[in-house]
Structures are given as C-alpha cells and as structure tokens.
Amino acid sequence: MRHPDDHPQPPSTSPGPPASPASGAFAPGAQTRDDRLLSALLTTAFVVLLAGALLRYVLKHGDSDRLPWILGLSVVLAVVQVAGQARPGSRRAGRVRLAVVVACWVVVVLLAPSFAWCAVPLIHTALRLLPTRSAVALVTALATLVVLAELRLADGFDPNHLLLPPVVAALATGVFVYLTREATRRQHLIDDLVRTRRELAATERREGTLAERQRLSREIHDSLAQGLSSQNMLLQAADRQWDTDPQAARTHLRTAASIAAHGLTEARRLVHDLAPADLAEGAGLAQALATLAARESRDGLTVRFHAEGPDTHLPDQAASALLRTAQGALANIREHSGARTAALTLTCLDDTVALDVADDGRGFPAPEPGGTRDPLGDPDPLRGHGLPAIRARLRQLGGTLAIESTPGEGAVLTATIPLTPATPPAP
C-alpha cells in the first residue's frame, strides 16, 4: 500500500570532528567533552527527525493498520538511541546498538518512507563507530534505501530524489574521512614532537654529564694532580738527601706537607663546587696570583708576579679560569722545562683581561697545525692533559690561548678572556 506522503525537506548536515585520530574509529568509553557534545547533538537530531516523521505519519495516516508497528518501532529507536547516549559503553556495545537502530530504521522506512531522512544522524554514527571501509559500505546502503524511499514518495520523476541522498551521504563521508585523517596526521606529528623532545632532553642530559666530567677532570688536574706531582718530586728529593743533607730533606718534607694541606683545601672546595682556595676568601685575582707566585718560588724556580692596568673586579668564572691557567702552566714549567725563573703578568684592559706566563726553560718546537699533543705536557698519553684543559676552560668563556716558544729560549703562554658578553666558539 502506497501512502501519498509529501516529500519532507532534508535537514542540513554538518559532520563533526573525529573523536579519535584512528581512521573511522571511535571509542565511546574514552570520550572527550567534544565527543560527548557531538554524540548528544546526533542523538537529539535523530530523535527530533524521528518525532517529526512519526507526527507527520499520525496526522496523515492515523487510521492505518501499520500505525501500531510504526509507533512501537519509533519508541524502540528512540529508547535505544537515548540509552546509547546516556551510557556509551564499549566500542563493541556501540556497534551492537547501531545494528539494532539500523535494523529497526530499515523496517520503519519500508513501512513509511517518510522516515528515510532519519538516516542522516545514522550516517555520522556509523562513520564514528565503524572502520572506514565498513562505514562507507553501510552509508552506501543507507543512501540507496533513502533514494528508494524518496522515489516511492514522489508523484513523478524528480532528479533531486535520485541525486540528493547520495550527494549528502558522499559529502558527510568525505568530510568526515578527511577530518579523521587530518587528526591522525596531527597525532603522528605530536607523537614525533614528543619523542623528539624526549630524545633532546636525553641528549642534553648526556651532554651535561659529559661537560661536568670534563670540568671535574680539569679541576682535578689543575689542583689535586699537580699538587700530588709536586709532592712526589719533593719526597723523591728528600729521600735522596736524607743521609747526606738531613736539613734539606726536612725542608722538602715540610714543603710537601704544605702542598698536601693546600691540596686538601682544594679537594674540599672542589667537592662543594666553590672557587679555588686562593680566591675563596674574597681575594682578587691579582692577590691570588701573587700568592701563587710566592708559593711556587722554591726548589730552584723563582716566580715573579706583575700586574698592569686598572685593578678591575673580574667575573668569578674569568678569575677562576686564569688562576687555574697559571697553576697549570707553572706545574708544567716546573716538571718539564728546567726553567730557573718564571713570570706571571696580568694585564687588565677595558674589555679584555690577559695573563702571560713566561719562563726561561728549554722551550719546545712549535706544535704542528691540527696536532693534538700537548707541547707543555708529558709524552705519556695518560698525563698529557695540561694544555687541552687550559684551552677548553678558556674556550668556554670565549677566550683564546696562544703559545710562543723556541727550543733553548723558553716559552710564553698567553691566555686572553673578553670581559664583554660573547658567544663561545663551537668546540
């Protein structure tokens, strides 16, 4: 029996954003606020369209014997749809509800074609719950049934009845799939950014650990290792002179004890990450270098200190770096050069501070360009850490290191640090 229902106008459709970056997948149990709003909108649209179609049927066909079936199925559709909105459940439960709703809707449309446009919210629900291929197949079937229903309602052939449902379904599907794939690409990008950020943080931690190890190695070399080397030389000298010159041997022992005490102070300050002992009591660099020169003037080596330029208060890092440079240079002079005299010259300018360490020792050939061997250090690779440590410390502050030497004519080491902010060169 064909009912002369008038053709209802199709409602406007606007597909919502995907609830999950997975293509065509929607997990009802993991809904966000936007997901819940979209679900409520789809449920409301379905119930409103269902109520409108039912009211129209009652007004036009109230005496039809199909009315009890249509009324009962409409109630079932509304209850199932609203229950699904109230308690989303799992994805599988959502698909079961969708199957029940689609089956009931198909029966209702076969009984009353005017219920056909209730398919619009079902299209969105299918796209959100099913994988893309399954959703497209279901949407195609729904659109085909809507076309058949429209043709049943039409008094004559109308191209809109044939074209409008597939176009609406295609637009809804295309936009939804596009938004879902865009969400997937964005999620992949976010995952890549998070992974890159974690890798960068791990790299920074490793670099920080390596930098701290290098810093500690330089500090240990310039303080503890040099002190232990001087003690070893003094104790060997005392052992050689113990029987022939006891007084000189005791002098060597007392000097070694003094160096040991100073090394103990340096070790404690190194543990607490403080400045060198000679700078710890608020003394300026000039006073610390003078103290160092006096302490190192022993065993045939005379060290003089001279300051030029204004008495400028230097940054702590610059003062510490220059003091460590002087300590390392004097240790190398004492151990390797055979010098009788050495001179420390501190020059303070407006934008630069420089330290010259000169000696009258045996000197050395100029190092080859690109060479890695320390010309002031020991041939033993386990001990040749002096010059590289000095250069690395200065480089961190944007400073430079220059060495001039000729065999038999001594050597001059010049360390320069800029006082204005500068970007340290890449290592």
Image: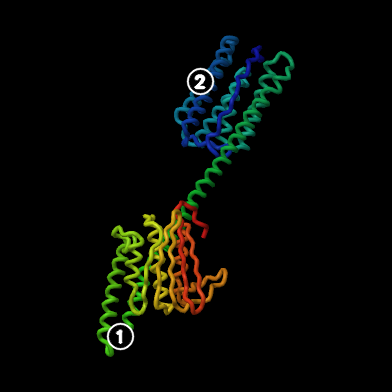
Which disc, if any, is residue 239? 1
Q: Is residue 413 left or right of residue 181?
A: left
Image location of residue 21, percent across then percent down: 55, 39
| Relative vertical location of residue 6 with respect to residue 381 in this rendering, above or below | above
**Whole-number angstrom distance, CA of label 1 to CA of label 2:** 109 Å
Image location of residue 20, percent across then percent down: 53, 37
| Relative vertical location of residue 128 with respect to residue 79 in this rendering, above or below | below
Would residue 326 be visible to someone looking at this image? yes
| Relative vertical location of residue 197 with respect to residue 147 in this rendering, above or below | below
- The image quarter in which residue 296 lies: bottom left
Image location of residue 125, percent across then percent down: 56, 30
Locate the N terminus and report the quarter of the image it occupies.
top right
- The image quarter in which residue 171 lies: top right
Would residue 270 be visible to someone looking at this image? no
**At x 73% / y 19%, what residue is drawn?**
159
**Nearer to me, 161 or 99:** 161
10 Å crowding of disc 2: few (<14), some (14-19), many (20+): some
**At x 50% / y 69%, what residue is drawn?**
403
- The image quarter in which residue 377 lies: bottom left
Image location of residue 374, percent across then percent down: 49, 72
Q: What amino acid is at disc 1?
A: Asp
User: Label 1's element?
Assistant: helix
Residue under pointer 2: 75
User: Label 2's element?
Assistant: helix
Disc with the residue nearer the chain's start (1 vs 2): 2
Task: Pick out the residue farthest to the front.
Answer: 309
10 Å crowding of disc 1: few (<14), some (14-19), many (20+): some
Q: What amino acid is at disc 2?
A: Val
Which disc, if any, is residue 113? none
**Nearer to me, 102 or 172:** 172
